[in-house]
Image (cartoon, grey):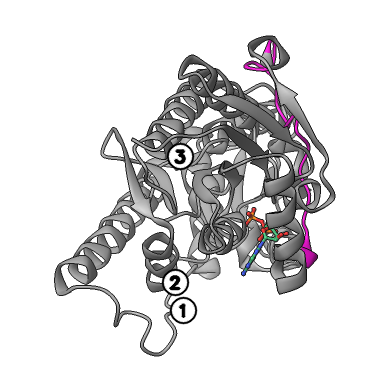
Amino acid sequence: MKQFKRIGVLTSGGDAPGMNAAIRAVTREAIYRGVEVMGIYRGYSGLIEGDIRPFGVRDVSNILNRGGTMLYSDRCPEFCTEEGMQKAVNTCREFEIDGIVAIGGDGTFRGANDLTAHGISCVGLPGTIDNDITSTDFTIGFDTAMNTAINLIDKLRDTCESHARCSVVEVMGRGAGDIALQTAIASGATAVAIPEIPFDADRAIDKIRTSHSLGKRTFIVIVSEGMGKEYSATLAKRIQEETGIETKFARFAHVVRGGDPTLRDRLLATLMGQRAVEELFLGNSNLVVCERAGSICTTEINYALTLDRMYKGKLAEGELSPYSQEQIADMHAIGERKRKLFEKLYSVVDRIGL
Ligand code: ADP
C-alpha cells in the first residue's frame, strides 16, 4: 500500500458527459480512504499555473447528473515541453500532491505518462465521447453522446416522414466511427459511412432509390466526422441529384458533447473513478482504467497507446519491441475483436436499415 498525503483530480482535452461523475467518485473514494483531494482546474494548464482548490465531499455535490466538467478543461501545449512539465512538477510539490487522476483522451494519457516519469503517480480515466481508446470497450461519455444523437435524429425522422425527405447526419467521433455506427442502428438509418470500413456510396444510393420506389418516405444516412470535412455535405447533394429525393444535411457537432450523462455513463464513471483511486493506493500508476467484457480492469498507459496505434495502423518502427509475444498477441486479439464487432454492426445496418 502506498501512503498519499494528497491526490489531485483533473479533466483535460475534449470534455465528455460523465466527467463530473468521475470527479465525484475520485474525490469521495479518496476522502473515504483518509486522503485529501485537490481539484485541479483547466487540465494541465491549471496544474502549471496552480489553479487548484481543496475538495471536500460537499464540493462535488450535485454534479453527478451534470454534463461538461466542473473542473473545466483545456488544451495545454506548454505541458508538452520540459519547461512546462517542470512547472507542473513544482506545483505538485508546492501543493503536496503526490498522485493524480487524469480524466481525458489519449493526449491526456500521454501527459499522465510524462508526469509519472517525473515522479507523480498518475492513473488515467478514459473520458471522451468518441470511444476511440481501443483498450476499453467503452469510454465515459460515449453512451450519452449516442443517446443525444438518436434523440435528435428521431426529431429529424418526424419531419422527413412528413415531407418524404432524406437527412444526411454527420456525427462526431474524430477518426473513430463508433458513434456513427451504433447511432445508425439505433436510429434506423439506411446507410452509414465510417472511416473503418470502405463506404460504397453508389450502393447506398441504389438502396435508397429502390426503397423509395417501393414506397419508403424517410431516409436517414449517418456519416462519421472521420470521413472528412466536406464528405457529408457532398454526399447529401449526390443523393438528392441521383435519386430526386429532397435531401438535407445536418452536422450535430458539439451538441452531442453536452447534456446530462445517461445511467450507463454515470455508472461507468463512478466505478472507474473508484478503481483509479484504489490503484493509486495499491502503489500502481501509469495505468488507464478500462472496461473490457463487462469488467473494470486496468492497462498500462504505454500499452494502451501502442494498442491504439496498432489498431489504427499507425505503429512506429520498433514500437512493439518492449512487449512480450503474449502481450502482442493480446493487442492483435483486442483489435481483431473490435474489427469483427464493427463488421457485424455494419452488416446489421445493411440488412435491417431498409
Ligand atoms: P485528449 O486527451 O482528449 O486526447 P488532447 O490530445 O488535446 O486531448 O490532449 C490533452 C492535453 O494533454 C494536451 O493539451 C496536452 O497538455 C497534453 N498532452 C497531449 N499530448 C501530450 C504529449 N505527447 N506529452 C505530454 N502531454 C501531452
Mark 3 CB lies closer than 8 A to ligand 1 = no
Q: Which residue is mark 2?
A: 309
Q: Nearer the viewer, residue 138 or 13?
A: 13
Considering only vertical position in the picture, is 330 above or below 319?
Answer: above
Q: Looking at the figure, which quarter contains the N terminus?
A: top left
Pinpoint residue 206: horizontal percent, then vertical percent.
Answer: 51, 61
Amino acid under disc 1: Lys
Q: Is residue 225 magenta?
A: no
Where does the image place residue 84, in percent across and percent down from the top left?
76, 65
Q: Earlier in the sequence, mark 1 or mark 3?
A: 3
Ranked by sequence position, the earlier of labels 2 and 3 is 3
The numbered dot on residue 207 is none
Residue 257 visible from this viewpoint? yes
Image position of 262 (left or right of 225):
left
Secondary structure of residue under mark 2: helix
Residue 116 or 316: which is nearer the viewer? 116
Q: Quadrant of residue 335?
A: bottom left
Residue at 40% across / 69% down in the picture?
Answer: 306
Q: What separation in Å lies between label 2 and label 1 (alpha carbons)?
A: 5 Å
Q: CA distance from mark 1 to mark 3?
A: 29 Å
Q: Which residues are magenta?
A: 61-78
Q: Within 10 angstroms of label 2, few (less than 14), some, or many (20 or more) residues? A: some
Residue 318, by quadrant, is bottom left
State which tag comes first along the sequence, 2 or 1. 2
Question: Dot 1, how many residues are within 10 Å of its Cα: few (below 14), some (14-19), or many (20+)?
Answer: few
* Contact flag, marks 2 and 1 (Cβ < 8 Å): yes
Q: Is residue 252 visible?
A: no
> Which residue is disc 1 drawn over?
314
Q: Which residue is mark 3?
A: 185
